[in-house]
Image (cartoon, helix red, strand yellow):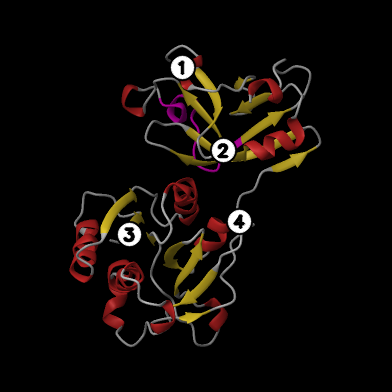
Amino acid sequence: MGIITLTSDMGLSDYYVASIKGKILSLSPKTQIIDISHYISPFKISQAAHVLKSTINDFPENTVHIVGVDAEPLINFRQPEESIYPTIIKYKGQYILSADNGFFSLFLGNNKAEGMWRLEDVLSRPELMNFPTKNILVPAACKIADGLPLETFCSPIESIKKAIPLSPIIEENTLKGAVNYIDHYGNIITNISKTDFERIGKNIPFTIYFRQKEYFIDTISLGYNEVPAGEKLAIFNDSGYLEIAINKGTPENGGGANSLFGMRLGDIIRIEFTPRGSRSTIDSLF
C-alpha cells in the first residue's frame, strides 16, 4: 500500500481537497492519504517548501508527496526557459510532485535530488489545466505509488527552475534572519538554523531582537515550559530552526507570539553576539 501526502493552499472550507482525495482513491484505491497542510498562504511556495522540509524525514522511503501550491503549468514556446512544467524529483528515497515554479529550488536548498523528471505532455488535454493538482499531479502520483516506472510516463531532466531564498545574513557580530513561517499557535519560525547560530555564536553571549529593539530574548530554552505560561521564549524546534514563542499562548486567546509582537512573514529577526547578552553559551544549552 503506497502513501501519498498532500500539501496545498486550498484550505478546507471548499470541496477542492475532497475532490483530490476522491481522484486518488479512484485511481489507486489502496493508497493511504495523509494531509500535511492545506493552510499554506495562497501561492506562497516558500511556506510549502518549509513545511515539507520539516516533515519529510518522518516519512518512509517511496512516499509520494503532492504539493498543490501555484501548481498551474505555463508553456512558453517563445521563451522555453520560462515554461513551468509539472515536475517530479526523488529525494531521500521519496518522490515529490509540484509545478517547477521555484518550489524545488527552495525545498532542496544546497541539497541534491536523486533524480528529476518532467511531465511534458500537458497540452494534449488543455481541459486538465483548470485543476492541475487533481488532473495532472494526482494521476502521476498514483502511478508512482502503484510502482509504475517513471520512465514510462515522464522524461528525465537535468535542472530545475531556480528561486532565490531568504537566507540568513552575517554582518560582523550580527546574524540577521527573517520570519519564514507562523504556525497554528502563532509561533514565529525563522529561517535561522541551529547551524547558522553556532557558526558565529559558539561560546559567545547573545541577544535576539525582534521589532527593532522593542522586544528581545537572551537565552535559548530547551522546552516551552522552561518559562512561565504567558512568557516569551526562544527555542530551536524539532526541525532545527529558531522559533520565537509564547508558552501556552495562541492566537485564539490573544497570546500568540505573532500577534503580541506584531510580527509578519518576512519580518527581520536579529541576533547580536555581544557581552550584553546571556552568559549562557551554546555548549551549555545543547
Q: Is residue 51 left or right of residue 253?
A: right
The residue wearing badge 4 is 109
Q: Position of residue 257 (x, y in %)?
A: 46, 27
How far separated are the C-alphas under marks 3 and 2?
A: 25 Å
Instruction: Name the mark nearer the viewer: 1 or 3.
Output: 3
Three-letter code for the amino acid on which mark 4 is drawn: Gly
Secondary structure type for disc 1 = helix
The boundaries of the magenta stretch are 256-268
According to the image, label 1 marks what residue?
Answer: 225
**First in residue order: circle 4 vs circle 2:** 4
**Of label 3 and label 2, which has the lower sequence position?**
3
Which quadrant, please, contains the N terminus?
A: bottom left
Where is residue 162, by image quadrant? bottom right
Q: Give SS at disc 3.
A: strand
Q: Quadrant of the C terminus?
A: top right
- Secondary element at tag 4: loop
Q: Nearer the viewer, residue 281 or 29?
A: 29
Task: Return the residue nearer the eye: 178 or 221.
Answer: 221
Which residue in the structure is indicated by mark 3?
4
Q: Residue at x 26, y 80 (%)?
A: 127
Q: How far apart are the two marked residues, 4 and 3, measured between alpha carbons?
A: 23 Å
Residue position marked by numbered label 2 in the rendering:
240
> Residue 130 at x, y = what percent?
29, 73
